Image (tube, coloured by chain):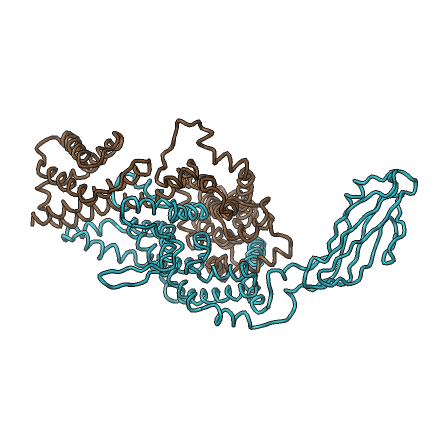
Amino acid sequence: MKFKSLTIFLIISSFFLTCILSIWKIMSTLQGLNFNNLNISTVFSVGILLSLSFVLIGNKINHLIKIFSLSFLFSTLYSYLNEASPYWYILGVFLIFLFFTNKLKKYSMKSLKEDFISEKIIFDFITLFGIVFFAFVILFPFYIMLVTSFKTQIALLVNPLDFSLDFSKNLTELFKSYFVIFETYNFGRYILISSAVSIGTVIVTLLFAIPAAYAVARLNFFGKNFLSTSILIIYMFPAIVLVIPLYTLFSQLGLRNSIFGLLIVYTATTLPVAIYMLQGYFKSIPKEIEDAGIMDGQNWFGIILKIIIPLSLPAITSVALYVFMIAWNEFLFSLMFLDSPKSFTLSRAIQYLSGDAETPRQYLMAGSVVVTVPVLLIFIYFEKYLVSGLTAGSVKE
Amino acid sequence: MSDSLSKLEKRTAYTLVLPAVLLVFAIVLFPIFANIWISFKDIELKDIRIPEPRSKKIIKSISENQSELKIIYKLRNSSLIQEIKNVQFQDKFPKDISPINLDSRCDFKSKKVICNFGNWEAKYRETFEISIKNNNGETIDKKIIKSQKPILTGKADNPLLTTNFTLENFKKVFFENNFVALLLTTFYFTFFGTVGAIIFGILAAQLVNQNIQGRTYMRGILLFPYVGPVVALAYTWTLLLDPNSGTLNALLVNFDIIEKPINLLGQKYITISIIGFEFKLRLALTTVIFFEIWRYFPLAFLFILARLQAIPQTLYEAADVDGASPMQKFIHITLPQITAIISILFMIRFIWNFNKFEDIFLLTGGASGTRTLPINVYQQGFAVSDIGMGSAVSIVIVMLLLSFMVIYFRLIGKRANEV
């Protein structure tokens, strides 16, 4: 029994260690280190030795001393078995060993006798592995996007694995792609247009949605139930089936290539979500507060302005941020309606750039960074509001 | 008393709701119906502009003292296929200026030249001239003349509003464009994209729901692909997967995992042999599905996490007392608690993946076996410029969607209220 759980423990912990060390090696390769072999079997045996010595030592010495000495010992062993590598790489390996041995803390020969210990070990390490895996898979493309924007096309064609940044160059050289996209490709203008469209959409959507949501949440009128169900159905309908009729209509009305046309479409497509989200929140406001307002002789305008809006600011913030994000990220309609570079939004401008095969990739990536960073910053800063918005409005994207 | 109050309430409600309803009707519902109309018409991209008479004004001096000018109007019919009827021309001049030898089709009245050009056939062009002089012999300011734009009016049929209908578009959709393959690709993409996103969503939610350090950061990071702009993410992936100098292929070659770079987005099939069995995998489609999973599993994750956090902790404590293993706890406590949300998620994501356009369009443009129905709408409507055909495909999408929704509300609609 003890032997079985020990074997499982050794194998799965070494597997985990191999994974992180391989990721570290890949990341270092991208810094220009010349590794050609992941040495998986070597790393795996080092991991087994390390885990084994960890549980064998057990509680005989202080935990801190134990993990430091073990990590030091094994990183020396690792660097001896591996190709020649610079000190910062070995330091990284040392830190990984430190992290790993610290995670082993709760295991000892004694704890390996507990009930269900093998399943617990598997769950524990799958959790750890999952976190490393998800973080790596998600952040890696963003990392590539960022570092590519600082490189040059030629350097990347010569060695597609060298993403190291040369800080000895002056800053203008490093940020050259950004200067180019702003000066040559007019990205300043596109940022302005994108911001104007997105902020405009937020304002107009709220102007239309707040009264409508209030009516749906509070007032009785014929067709109310029909309206609330049709809201749900409408926002299941995809943009792609609207595109052809809207394109023909806008061509005939001369609304193509106009920011105004884009604004109408964005507002109309986000309105159902906004109404749905807001009416849910409005319903949760106690009706007595409004009754007091009616007693004071307020009409519906006064009630909405003085009671409902101040009380539902968090919900309005989520809706506003959510709508902003949809409008900022929107691509299909801007692709269809905008053909003149004078009225491009950021997304459309990047797509236009990529249409020219001659455009060096670092410009494309610099543009991508420019369009991504604002959304991510807003998201990180307002995460709480946005998550509730995402959850409520998830039926639509 | 209460009657008038409820009337007032109704009236208020309609004033509040109407603007939003009208806007949504005009931009969302109207196009869906307009699709039906267009899909029965034989109409191309170039037909949708209403033909209009156009002119370009060029000014030339005749005499030395510039008291006489010649104005050349380059007139044309903007349409290459349609006639414009009853074209009227009108241009205004400053005072003291009068035309010399005016064309017989024109009149000069109260400082305006008005001409009747009659009907212009398609592609019609004419160079039309008016010479003018200043009655006092003074110099004419060219800029003032130039800044006055002539007004041209004419009547033309709007090709969209004629009543010639045809079934050709639907015939082409169902019988000419390999409809079955298109539908299959769409279903592969939709089904595997949805299932993958939900599986990864469950895994991620299960991870973050445990007591680990920095779980709020982890939740934020996991949502990055979902909140990032699709254009930026799709191009980053394209670069990453590029066969010539993409990072992924370079890494795999560098570590000797593959011999030659694989064109993950440009190769339709790849042959894989597992224990002697060889089978063909739709490579580009699989890559696109993986992008789709990468981008949308965060949503499933968010929903499932919210549900997991609502499960009472006492259930797990009771299971601990009974000596349940982690796996048993997951199967007997966690899974039953999240099946409702998973079925809702499945339907929502299924419908949305079914309509996905941007992701595939940006990654492959619909090449290498990744053409789905939404991509087909774009290709027919704008690449082949057959608007009627594009609309017909849209109608097919709408019909399929409606049937999904009927199923959705029948099967899961009741459950949705419980959650």
- Residue B177 can be seen, yes or no: yes
Q: Residue furthest right?
A: B136
The residue sitting at 84% across, 46% down in the picture is B70
Vertical side of B232 occupied by A71: above or below? above
Q: In screen coordinates, is B407 left or right of A29?
A: right
Please tell me how many numbered marks the rendered image carries: 0
Q: Colour of chain B?
A: cyan
Q: In screen coordinates, is A42 left or right of B358?
A: left
- Residue B244 x, y percent position in the rendering: 39, 47
Q: Nearer the viewer, residue A363 or B206?
A: A363
- Residue A320 x, y percent position in the rendering: 48, 44
Vertical side of B223 occupied by B415: above or below? below
Q: In screen coordinates, is A311 left or right of B30?
A: left
Q: Nearer the viewer, residue A322 or B156?
A: B156
Choose top left, top right, bottom left or bottom right for residue B414: bottom left
- Residue B366 x, y percent position in the rendering: 45, 58
The residue sitting at 16% across, 41% down in the picture is A47
Q: Nearer the viewer, residue A338 or B78?
A: B78
- Residue A343 x, y percent position in the rendering: 58, 45
Q: Colour of chain A?
A: brown
- Residue A297 can be seen, yes or no: no
